[in-house]
Image (spheres, grey):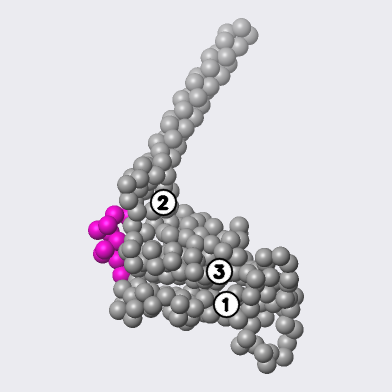
Amino acid sequence: MKKNFNIFATLIVIVGIFSCTNQSNEKQADNESYNNTQLLVEKVLTADDQAALTPDKVINTLKGGNQRFMNNNITARNLSSQVRNSTHGQYPEAIILSCIDSRVPVEYIFDRGIGDLFVARVAGNFVNEDILGSMEYACKVAGSKLILVLGHEHCGAVKAAVDNVELGNITAMLAKIKPALEPFSEYQGDKTSKNEDFVHMVCESNVNNTIKEIRIKSPILKEMEDDNEIKIIGAVYDMTTGEVVFLDE
């Protein structure tokens, strides 16, 4: 009986050692895989990289990144290395004008890293003098190839403009969005924020109106676009699917 017990105990020890060794090997493999993945991207855009870009190449890059975002396949980046590698210069490929909405994480939805994008944010993604100046800096001075005006579904600022909200400085802010309502003066449906279809139409109209304002109020950017140095385009982010739908395509 004692002999059998000793054999049984020995088997347990052997199994335990094998199990621990196997788990240790698996953990080591996982750690190595994790570390290799984390180090996948540490490079940032250089001046030569940026110079080789065209507006269409940048658009395709953003579309590809959004597809990865939708598939939950975001590129692993060594952000610490990217911070260090971008310390002495930046050469972003685009400037994106987005709403301040916390549900629209611009770099994430395009799967871009440190140094890839300029991002301007204001409730309702409209332009004013400061944002236009920022865009001019991004494109004329810093070399970005694309301006993307990014609206989004369920935008609180658009809904507030639709409902004619008046409150403090919000009133003046919404006045910059309300021109997007003008094309719908003859609309026969419910023109309140409860009508999601109407809000969507106003959202797209607001993006297009912002693009028009950029071209009218910035001769610098308009000339760059006319000379094919940059493109000025619009898109709408779908919160339900994570898809960025580019307009006029």
Looking at the rendering, the stretch of residues picked out in magenta corresponds to: 45-54
Q: How many marks?
A: 3
In front of the other: 93 or 31: 93
Residue placed at 26% from the left, 63% from the top? 51
The residue at which mark 3 appears reads as 125
Q: Do the residues under discs 1 and 3 have CB atoms within 8 angstroms?
A: yes
Q: Please tell me which of labels 2 and 1 falls first in the chain.
A: 2
Image quarter where the N terminus lies is top right
- In the image, residue 127 lies at what x, y percent? 52, 71
- Magenta-colored stretch includes residue 244: no
- Magenta-colored stretch includes residue 53: yes
Q: Do the residues under discs 2 and 1 have CB atoms within 8 angstroms?
A: no
Q: Residue furthest top?
A: 2
Instruction: Kindly state the secondary structure of the residue where label 1 is placed.
Output: helix
> In whole angstroms, how far apart are the C-alphas of marks 1 and 3?
8 Å
Closer mark to the observer between disc 2 and disc 1: 1
* 179 lies left or right of 192: left
Residue placed at 42% from the left, 75% from the top? 218
Q: Identify residue type, mark 1.
A: Asn
The residue at which mark 2 appears reads as 114
Q: Identify residue type, mark 2.
A: Ile
Q: Please tell me which of labels 3 and 2 falls first in the chain.
A: 2
Quarter of the image holding residue 199? bottom right
- In the image, residue 202 lies at what x, y percent? 62, 79
Q: Do the residues under discs 3 and 2 have CB atoms within 8 angstroms?
A: no
Q: Identify residue type, mark 3.
A: Asn
- The 10 Å Cα crowd at callout 1, few under 14, some 14 to 19, many 20 or more, is many
Q: Is residue 227 above or below residue 109?
A: below
> In whole angstroms, how far apart are the C-alphas of marks 3 and 2?
22 Å
Q: Please tell me which of labels 1 and 3 falls first in the chain.
A: 3
Instruction: Kindly state the secondary structure of the residue where label 3 is placed.
Output: loop
